[in-house]
């Protein structure tokens, strides 16, 4: 990593020196730690994805795209990829919908309880997702809070299937990523200014118009950041799909784990990981593009938009 | 909420405000629902999960400590998190110092490299670490867990300590140097006291992240060295009784106590508010 970084051409006219003895000495422990525990293992995954799995869990050392071809030509794996993206999109949309009103409220309120209310909204971050998923199992299960309550009220005779399927995973994941979305939105709502809303309202704009023409455009960058964050998190989420999915929801994360530890097919696990990373790359590229479009709309000639 | 004083249809306005408040309360309830359920369940006296809970007892809390795998899990996670936090500080603090106080070519590239583990999903890192640690063989050992947690905690230490160094005034250090202090003395006498809170938050964050790490640990732990989150996950998958709820409540209390202590002692509140 350092060699590359040092070799990179400096664009600045005044060329600072490369890392001197002091800088290198200070950076060394960190670089060694990251090389051993992060860079090298990731390179190993790439290398493993080019191997093939032989008979009886043996790994055939080779350099080929055979395992990639095998995975990408199988309907099963395309289903898994499809369900991963579907889950990601559903969770992202649901999380944005339920987080936006709260974030808007927290960003604008002048209540003296604001600190407490913000703390309450992000407290769940302190609690392990295993514990929160367990809470959702107790709420959504066939004997859970929702089904028991609805059953006793006589609204349903058969329990609603809210766990061991995609619906349950979406509900629980939405709640689990809400604090992330709220935090990302609040810090992205910096341009929101009550004065602008007052101005629009005093010029006679109805509340709906004020929201559509003033509040929404000013909050879109924050919403976009939150969307990226939640989408990326839910693409790779493992605990909730495994526990709430009850072995019936197959996404890349659960399959990577199964292939690595149960099926012991490391080349396939590595290929699935590379595909997940590729998916990340696509999502981030889309995000950067969307951000650019938004920026252009903000900084472009204001009169051009009608 | 724009307050329009047009006098037209005040009842509609009031209705709108009440509806808005109801929506907010409902959203808060949704957000806190699993935690509230876990809290209520933790005092139930049944041996299985049921609604509504019928008794009130602390039995489930006793069961947490009677459970061998939880006791061991707490020990494994505690030791792993402490050593991981220490090593992450040793690796991260000097790096943060170099990245914020020294000018050199490739600085921003190195900084990006230090923060890049934050972008890689843990499910991929877990597999990566399994592939590396299994042949050595270090899976299912303390050192394996510690190495596995190091990569994901160092970036947080670098980020937290860098932020503290950025807000500390470098001119005080320069003044000390001008007055004849060596680089190390200036660091020890001027910089260190100024970034003490940043150092402590970095250490605490690293500890909590490691203590709570689930997915990476799943890959590199086996039968003998099982950290608490993995033990809980395996337990939850096959059984559901109130002891998991009690354990969760205890862990929440632990992290709240840690955060409150850090905040009271070191003004973490200030850095949170600005963020």
Image (spheres, grey):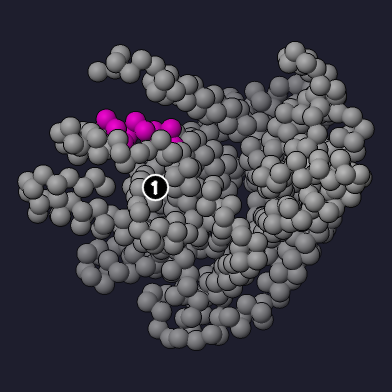
- Relative height, residue B49 to residue A167 (above, below): below
Query: Residue B152: within the magenta?
Result: no
Residue A266, position as x, y percentages in the image = 73, 38
- Relative height, residue A189 to residue B222 (above, below): above
Query: Residue A222: within the magenta?
Result: yes
Residue A23, position as x, y percentages in the image = 86, 35
Q: Nearer the viewer, residue B271 or B182?
A: B182
- Relative height, residue B220 to residue A50 (above, below): below
Q: Nearer the viewer, residue A47 or A35?
A: A35
Query: Which residue is the site of mark 1?
Result: A107
Label 1 CA crowd tier, 10 Å (few <14, some 14–19, many 20+): many
Left or right: B2, with A223 as reference point: left
Q: Nearer the viewer, residue B161 or A144?
A: B161
Can residue A108 be seen? Answer: yes
Left or right: A157, with B41 as reference point: left
Q: Main secondary structure of the magenta part?
A: helix
- Relative height, residue A70 to residue B31 (above, below): above
Left or right: A180, with A15 as reference point: left
Of the 4 image quadrants, the one containing the N terminus of chain A is top right
Of the 4 image quadrants, the one containing the C terminus of chain A is top left
* Quarter location, residue A95: top left
Does dot 1 land on a helix, a strand or a loop?
helix
Count of numbered badges drawn on the protein: 1
Report the residue at 55% width, 75% height from top.
B246
Residue A150, position as x, y percentages in the image = 27, 66
- State which region is magenta: A213-223
Q: Residue furthest front?
A: B179
Report the residue at 78% width, 25% height from top.
B106
Q: Nearer the viewer, residue A117 or A57?
A: A117
Name the chain under label 1.
Answer: A
Q: Residue furthest left?
A: B8
Report the residue at 57% width, 41% height from top.
A236
């Amino acid at each position: 990593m350092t060699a590359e970084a040092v070799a990179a051409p400096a664009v600045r006219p005044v060329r600072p020196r490369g890392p001197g003895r002091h800088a290198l000495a200070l950076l060394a422990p960190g670089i060694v730690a990251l090389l051993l525990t992060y860079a090298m293992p990731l390179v190993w995954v790439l290398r493993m994805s080019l191997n093939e799995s032989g008979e009886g869990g043996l790994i055939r050392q080779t350099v080929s795209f055979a395992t990639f071809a095998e995975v990408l030509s199988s309907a099963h794996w395309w289903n898994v990829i499809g369900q991963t993206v579907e889950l990601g999109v559903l969770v992202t949309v649901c999380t944005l919908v339920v987080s936006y009103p709260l974030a808007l409220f927290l960003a604008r309120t002048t209540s003296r309880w604001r600190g407490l209310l913000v703390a309450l909204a992000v407290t769940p971050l302190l609690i392990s997702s295993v514990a929160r998923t367990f809470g959702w199992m107790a709420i959504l299960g066939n004997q859970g809070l929702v089904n028991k309550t609805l059953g006793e009220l006589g609204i349903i005779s058969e329990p609603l299937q809210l766990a061991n399927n995609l619906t349950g995973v979406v509900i629980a994941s939405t709640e689990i990523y809400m604090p992330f979305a709220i935090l990302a939105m609040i810090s992205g709502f910096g341009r929101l200014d009550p004065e602008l809303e007052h101005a629009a309202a005093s010029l006679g704009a109805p509340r709906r118009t004020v929201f559509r023409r003033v509040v929404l455009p000013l909050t879109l960058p924050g919403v976009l950041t939150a969307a990226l964050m939640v989408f990326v998190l839910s693409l790779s989420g493992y605990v909730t799909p495994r526990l709430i999915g009850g072995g019936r929801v197959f996404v890349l994360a659960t399959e990577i784990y199964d292939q690595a530890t149960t099926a012991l097919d490391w080349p396939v696990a590595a290929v699935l990981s590379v595909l997940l990373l590729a998916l990340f790359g696509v999502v981030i590229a889309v995000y950067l593009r969307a951000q650019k479009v938004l920026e252009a709309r903000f900084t472009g000639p204001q009169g051009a938009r009608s | 909420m724009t307050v329009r004083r047009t006098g037209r249809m005040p009842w509609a306005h009031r209705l709108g405000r009440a509806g808005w408040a109801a929506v907010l309360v409902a959203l808060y309830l949704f957000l806190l629902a699993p935690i509230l359920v876990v809290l209520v369940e933790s005092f139930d006296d049944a041996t299985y999960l049921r609604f509504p809970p019928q008794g009130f007892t602390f039995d489930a809390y006793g069961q947490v400590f009677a459970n061998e795998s939880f006791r061991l899990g707490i020990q494994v996670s505690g030791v792993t998190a402490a050593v991981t936090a220490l090593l992450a500080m040793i690796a991260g603090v000097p790096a943060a110092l170099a990245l914020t106080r020294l000018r050199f070519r490739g600085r921003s590239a190195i900084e990006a490299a230090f923060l890049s583990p934050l972008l890689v999903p843990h499910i991929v890192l877990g597999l990566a670490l399994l592939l590396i640690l299994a042949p050595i063989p270090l899976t299912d050992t303390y050192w394996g867990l510690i190495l596995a947690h190091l990569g994901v905690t160092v970036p947080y230490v670098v980020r937290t300590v860098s932020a503290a160094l950025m807000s500390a005034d470098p001119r005080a250090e320069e003044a000390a140097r001008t007055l004849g202090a060596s680089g190390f003395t200036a660091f020890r006498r001027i910089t260190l006291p100024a970034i003490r809170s940043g150092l402590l938050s970095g250490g605490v964050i690293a500890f909590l992240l490691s203590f709570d790490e689930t997915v990476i640990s799943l890959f590199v732990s086996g039968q003998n060295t099982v950290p608490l989150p993995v033990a809980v996950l395996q337990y939850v998958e096959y059984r559901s009784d109130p002891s998991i709820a009690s354990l969760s409540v205890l862990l929440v209390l632990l992290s709240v106590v840690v955060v409150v202590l850090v905040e009271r002692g070191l003004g973490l509140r200030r850095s949170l508010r600005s963020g």
